[in-house]
Image: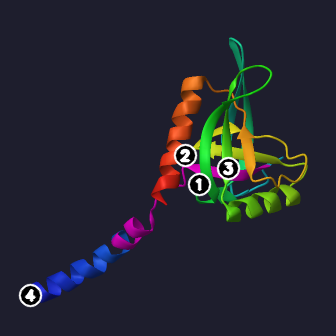
Amino acid sequence: MTMKKLIQLLSVCLLPFVTIAASTSPPPVFQMRLVLDVAVGDCDCDDMVLVHKRGDTSQKEMLHVQHLVLLNQSALKSATVTTNQPDGSPRIEIAFTDEGKKRFAEVTRQSIGKRLAIVIGGQLYSAPKIMTEISGGTAAISGSFSQQEATELVAKITESIEKR
């Protein structure tokens, strides 16, 4: 076998691997996805655990979170740690870009009565029920996280915003 034929053969064999490697990109750090009430057949969803902490106890809830990402960190302008009133627990406040504000208002308007999963770094942190359209350009994520965890999550989100 000549060197030219060997190189052609290797090129043909390796092309699928190069294509797969090129198309594999890391998932967005910050995601908003809808929660399904019931997973039916091949639901195109992930089963994710949401942990609710109350003092020293915690309760786990299994949720069916759709794969479709409705919003990611490209829709965000900033993220900060604030304090939830009146209990003093930490929460993450996010501000949307102009385009993100419009998209978030649209998502909440079309999804009233449904739960919106907040996924950060591949982990489910919150899944509030959408009660009304939210059009003000900001949202707060109240989850079961400590001050340190909230600070670390905001740092991840902020870093992902700056990389876009």
- Which residue is disc 2 drawn over? 157
User: Residue 156: which disc?
Assistant: none
Classify 10 Å Cα crowding around label 3: few (below 14), some (14-19), many (20 and above).
some
- Looking at the rendered structure, the number of numbered marks drawn on it comes to 4
- Which residue is disc 3 drawn over? 95
- Which residue is disc 1 drawn over? 73
128 with respect to 30 (left or right): right
Q: Indicate the quadrant containing the N terminus: top left, top right, bottom left or bottom right.
A: bottom left
Q: Is the C-beta separation of discs 1 and 2 under 8 Å?
A: yes
Compute the Cα span from label 2 to label 3. 12 Å
Q: Earlier in the sequence, mark 2 or mark 3?
A: 3
Tell which of 99 and 36 is nearer to you: 99
Q: What's the amino acid at mark 1? A: Gln
Disc 2 secondary structure class: helix
Q: What's the amino acid at mark 3? A: Ala
Disc 1 secondary structure class: helix
Tell which of 94 and 34 is nearer to you: 94
Q: Nearer the viewer, mark 4 or mark 3?
A: 3
Decide whether residue 77 is among the magenta residues: no
Residue 41: which quarter of the image?
bottom right
Magenta segment: 18-35
Residue 46 seen in the current view: no
- Which residue is disc 4 drawn over? 2
Q: What's the amino acid at mark 2? A: Ile
Decide whether residue 23 is among the magenta residues: yes
Q: Horizontal and vertical percent for residue 86?
A: 80, 21
Q: Nearer the viewer, mark 4 or mark 1?
A: 1
